[in-house]
Image (cartoon, rainbow, N blue to C red):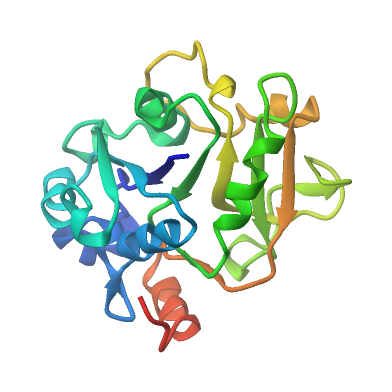
Amino acid sequence: MRALLFAAGEGRRMRPLTQILPKPLIEVGGVPMAVRQILALRKAGITEIVVNAAHGARILMAELGDGRSLGVKLLWSVEGFTAEDALETRGGIVRALPLLGSGPFIAVAGDIMTDFDYSALVRRAGTLSSGGSLAHLVLVPNPGFHAKGDFGLADGKVCRTGEKFTFSSLALYHPAMFEGLPDERAKLFPWMNEWIDRGQVSGELYRGRWANVGTPEELSRAEALFAGDPE
């Protein structure tokens, strides 16, 4: 099983830090967020990880290399070398599909922090199939900056009604969901809503630690949440 680590975005709201470093290389507790994600995936037994890159791609590749120093193998899906080249989430997945294999894969943003156990998604991979559920989303309680949430949950399925929670930018996907899509810039939502309405997207609510480091304020929150955590 492989994973996709999203690391192509610019992180404009994190300037001036992101004028120096790609956002996934910003440190929380002295460890770059991308490194934390790689180590969490390795702990779950995933040792082949695709990293997509655009803004700051050369810096990312120079810093992370082939992943050997972190005990994994990194495969690079380079979309370009500027923020304008980034393909968004759906586009990034489509571009990376040839590197991800034929089975379900984990996809996670390089700018989130969480103590979610990724091995839970490894165990769940067998529940996805081309004729059944095509994705499994991890939702979290709504943070202050996204109080209205994104999706509800009903009988283990993601829905667009009822009490809403926030998509954590952590999910499990079956490649069949993206087969035949054009290789172009494209967002994941609202495109995925069609699959949600068909009942082909399962989900769960995670109430543990999670932070989306999109602003300096959220970086401070992540530092407080994960203070003292080992790599």
Residue at image x 79%, y 49%?
Answer: 152
Residue 18, image x and y in percent?
A: 22, 60
With respect to residue 56, does 191 lie above or below?
above
How many numbered marks are there?
A: 0
With respect to residue 163, does 26 lie above or below?
below
**Which is nearer the eye, 1 or 57?**
1
With respect to residue 48, does 216 lie above or below?
below
With respect to residue 181, does 128 lie above or below?
below
**Which is nearer the eye, 200 or 215?**
200
Residue 128, image x and y in percent?
A: 68, 32
Residue 209 falls left or right of residue 93? right
**Which is nearer the eye, 32 or 151?**
32
Q: Indicate the quadrant where residue 55 lies.
A: top left
Residue 59 falls left or right of residue 171? left
Quarter containing the C terminus: bottom left
Residue 172, image x and y in percent?
A: 58, 41
**Which is nearer the eye, 161 or 131?**
131
Residue at image x 19%, y 32%?
Answer: 80
Residue 106 falls left or right of residue 57? right
- Residue at the extreme top: 180
Residue at image x 72%, y 30%?
Answer: 133
